């Protein structure tokens, strides 16, 4: 599961747990993006802060892992590079999926080396509140026609976004129960998003 994770929240964690359970997967790797090419805004936390927050959030779950391959890489974080790198590490016979939310599914064909990427890995799209389901069917058709192996996994709808959490911190509103306690503490201790 890739993402900016700025910060990681319970929507990410429940999505990961639900996918893991529904598909009977062994583990979920959270891969915080180092320098995401399609995303930039003022006040983005540094890669190391975003990494540290994911690290403490996934720690209590023995099936969750964190990977530093994107935060360690110089330059932009491209999924094709990540998938190529992961395939050299994964034990033989292991199958990997790239997990992403419904809001990002329509972007895949715009990612770097998309046609190569969709040959190399299968995708799991988790449902997410925000009216994405309307356009999703058509996007899935386009992706399938391009040769992409992609499935939708229905998960409980959690209307939490990192954007809202950053806004809440900025305006001194509560983020309790939206993120794990260790993430909340980390944000305040390091004065993120203020
Ligand atoms: P931002 O508001 O900064 O875009 P975000 O909440 O969308 O943050 P990302 O780091 O962009 O978080 O998300 C990483 C991945 O997790 C994306 O593929 C996204 O679609 C998915 N995701 C994020 N939040 C949820 C959620 N509440 N339910 C399901 N999927 C989610
Ligand atoms: Mg997002």
Image (cartoon, rainbow, N blue to C red):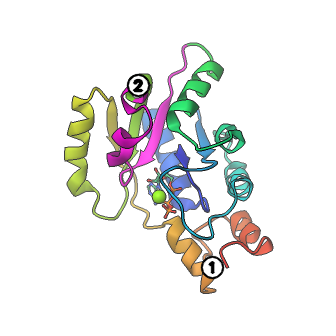
> Which residue is tagged 2?
116
Residue located farthest toward the top when viewing the structure as drawn: 92
Horizontal and vertical percent position of residue 157: 39, 60
Horizontal and vertical percent position of residue 109: 34, 39
Say above or below: 17 vs 9.
Answer: above
- Name the residue nearer the viewer: 7 or 58: 7
Q: Range of the magenta residues?
A: 93-117
Work out whether mark 1 precedes mark 2 in sequence or the reverse, and give the earlier one. 2
From mark 1 to mark 2, how far is it between C-alphas? 40 Å
Horizontal and vertical percent position of residue 11: 50, 59
* Residue at image point 21% right, 46% down: 137
Residue 114 lies in the magenta-colored region: yes
* Residue at image point 72% right, 70% down: 187
Judge the density around disc 1: few (<14), some (14-19), many (≥20) Cα neighbours within 10 Å. Answer: some
Q: Which mark is residue 155?
A: none
- Name the residue nearer the viewer: 17 or 191: 191
Question: Residue 175, located in which quarter of the rendered image?
Answer: bottom right
Local secondary structure at mark 1: helix
* Residue at image point 44% right, 46% down: 100
- Name the residue nearer the viewer: 108 or 90: 108
Local secondary structure at mark 2: helix
Decide if residue 81 is on the left or right side of residue 148: right
> Which residue is tagged 1?
169
The C terminus lies in which quarter of the figure? bottom right
Q: Is mark 1 within 8 Å of ligand 1?
A: no
Question: Residue 30, located in which quarter of the rendered image?
Answer: top right
Question: Residue 128, located in which quarter of the rendered image?
Answer: bottom left
Say above or below: 111 vs 185.
Answer: above
Decide if residue 60 is on the left or right side of residue 32: right
Residue located farthest toward the right when viewing the structure as drawn: 189
Horizontal and vertical percent position of residue 191: 75, 75
Q: Is residue 174 visible?
A: no
């Amino acid at each position: 599961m890739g993402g900016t994770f700025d910060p990681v929240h319970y929507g990410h964690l429940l999505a990961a747990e639900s996918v893991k359970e529904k598909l009977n997967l062994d583990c979920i790797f959270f891969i915080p993006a180092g320098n995401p090419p399609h995303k930039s805004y003022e006040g983005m936390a540094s890669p190391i802060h975003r990494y540290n927050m994911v690290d403490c959030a996934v720690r209590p779950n023995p099936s969750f892992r964190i990977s530093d391959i994107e935060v360690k890489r110089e330059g932009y974080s491209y999924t094709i590079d990540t998938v190529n790198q992961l395939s050299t590490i994964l034990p033989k016979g292991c199958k990997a999926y790239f997990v992403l939310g419904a809001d990002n599914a329509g972007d895949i064909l715009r990612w770097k080396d998309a046609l190569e990427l969709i040959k190399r890995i299968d995708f799991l799209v988790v449902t997410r509140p925000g009216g994405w389901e309307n356009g999703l069917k058509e996007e899935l058709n386009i992706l399938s026609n391009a040769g992409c192996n992609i499935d939708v996994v229905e998960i409980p709808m959690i209307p939490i976004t990192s954007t809202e959490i950053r806004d809440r911190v900025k305006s001194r509103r509560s983020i309790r129960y939206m993120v794990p306690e260790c993430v909340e503490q980390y944000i305040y201790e390091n004065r993120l998003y203020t």
